[in-house]
Amino acid sequence: MKISFHGAVQGVTGSCHLLKAEDANGHERQLLFDCGMFQGQQMCSATNLEPFGFDPKEVNHVFITHPHADHTGRIPKLVKEGFRGKIYMTRPCIGLTKLVLEDAHHIMKEDAEKCGSSVLYEMKDLLTAFDQVEGIGYHEEIEPFPGIKISFHDAGHVLGSAFVSVKAEGKTIIFSGDIGNDDVPILPDTDRIHDADVVVCESTYGHREHEGRPERSQKLKAAIEETIKNKSVLMIPAFSIERTQELLYEIDLLLKDELKTSISIFLDSPMAIKATQLYRENQNYLRFEAPMLEEKDRDFFSFPNLRETLSVEDSKQINYEKPPKIIIAGSGMMSGGRIMHHLIRYLPDPKNQVLIIGYQARGTLGREIYEGSKKVHIFREEVDVNAKITAIGAFSAHGDMHKLTRWLQPEDGQTPKQIFLVHGDPESKEVFATHLRHQFKTEVVIPGFEEAFTL
Ligand SMILES: [Zn+2]
């Protein structure tokens, strides 16, 4: 059995891992786990256009852990280059993946016009890809080839997210995808692993500890109270999938129980509005702690102060709304989207605040602001950053080092014999590798780009 790594080895994006395993009849089968896009400031980054380090025509099937573009963004390219197998993912993952890939295509076209590069795929490739998609239930075992068994398990990262277990050649290999945080109020808990021989594990926050959920709720409350007191603007750049819905849920809880306020809250992201609708439609995959749905004026992620501004016209109206107000807008790393217009307008005023609730990748405007830059460039305009910048780590959709360690420590006590660390910045992987070697006395490998290993 062979494994090779074709993305998410030099950073957190581009997840794509190839497993070659023999089935019961001795035929070698090629299975791909995730097929993500490399992301940075611009999606037209040349890396995405480079050929895959394998032949897409030779890949038998693809297994997708969750909808995020850094795990799904190169699927249409794979199809365009001749992949004809099935693309397996959980059922709630399908609608969200479509939303993500359509959005990525849209941004890519804009970027391509700006930097004169070619687009990664056309809309028709995306549609063809969805003809090959097959929905699968959690904990349902499939056997695509005799002797190769595959199942999806709750990862607690976003709606529809999974880690994937593969049984082949007498071994169990687990691909973590992205592992969620502890105490996620709206998702089921992360499943535990069993009898894994090899784990390919993400390490986004392998070097960090998140604060707990009560603390995050208090920080959020403080930010809202300050905004009301200062009659100012609170900007929350949010990722459309999961972070936005968790945030809405937390704000709803706060408004209902602790803060009696009529402050206006705008959800100013078409993508987040559509994703929230998919969350409503897939509510049987969610869990809720509060009996808030029994109240007449509340349904999933809707409450009286909240306004969804889908059209550009509605979005522009936000400017005329008197503060205090809360604006939730994408993109989450402030690398595009409607948040850019709000930042230009509101960053210079020291009374305003930006609340950062997610990972900010190197090279993004979000990272610059997070690290305390006093002047930034947005659409070639120089903007003074006087607004207060606050970060809440606990909103992260990724588990911290403790959560990842607990997840890797199976219930039956048998620790994995080999762990490959992917999906993390170099320092995060190094710190986490040292920690794991000490904790588990097991082999921990940090693979290089396109490096292959025999298992
Ligand atoms: Zn993810």
Image: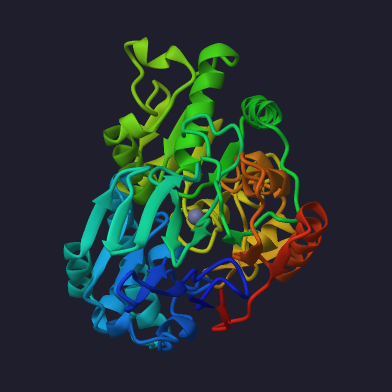
State the residue at coordinates (64%, 31%). Answer: 220
Q: Position of residue 222 (x, y in %)?
A: 69, 27
Q: Position of residue 75 (x, y in %)?
A: 33, 71
- Compared with 246, 88 (above or below) is below
Q: Is residue 83 left or right of residue 117?
A: left
- The image quadrant of residue 144 is bottom left
- State the residue in front, 81 or 201: 201
Q: Can residue 188 be seen by looking at this rendering? A: yes
Q: Is residue 329 left or right of residue 203?
A: left
Q: Is residue 189 left or right of residue 205?
A: left
- The image quadrant of residue 224 is top right
State the residue at coordinates (23%, 56%). Answer: 134
Q: Is residue 352 left or right of residue 14?
A: right
- Compared with 59, 140 (above or below) is above
Q: Can residue 392 be seen by looking at this rendering? A: no
Q: Position of residue 190 (x, y in %)?
A: 53, 40
Q: Position of residue 244 (x, y in %)?
A: 47, 41
- State the residue in front, 359 or 262: 359
Q: How many marks?
A: 0
- State the residue in front, 352 or 446: 446
For the C terminus, give its image quadrant.
bottom right
- Compared with 396, 177 (above or below) is below
- Compared with 226, 5 (above or below) is below
State the residue at coordinates (37%, 26%). Answer: 302
Which color scheme does this rendered protein use? rainbow
- State the residue in front, 432 or 123: 432
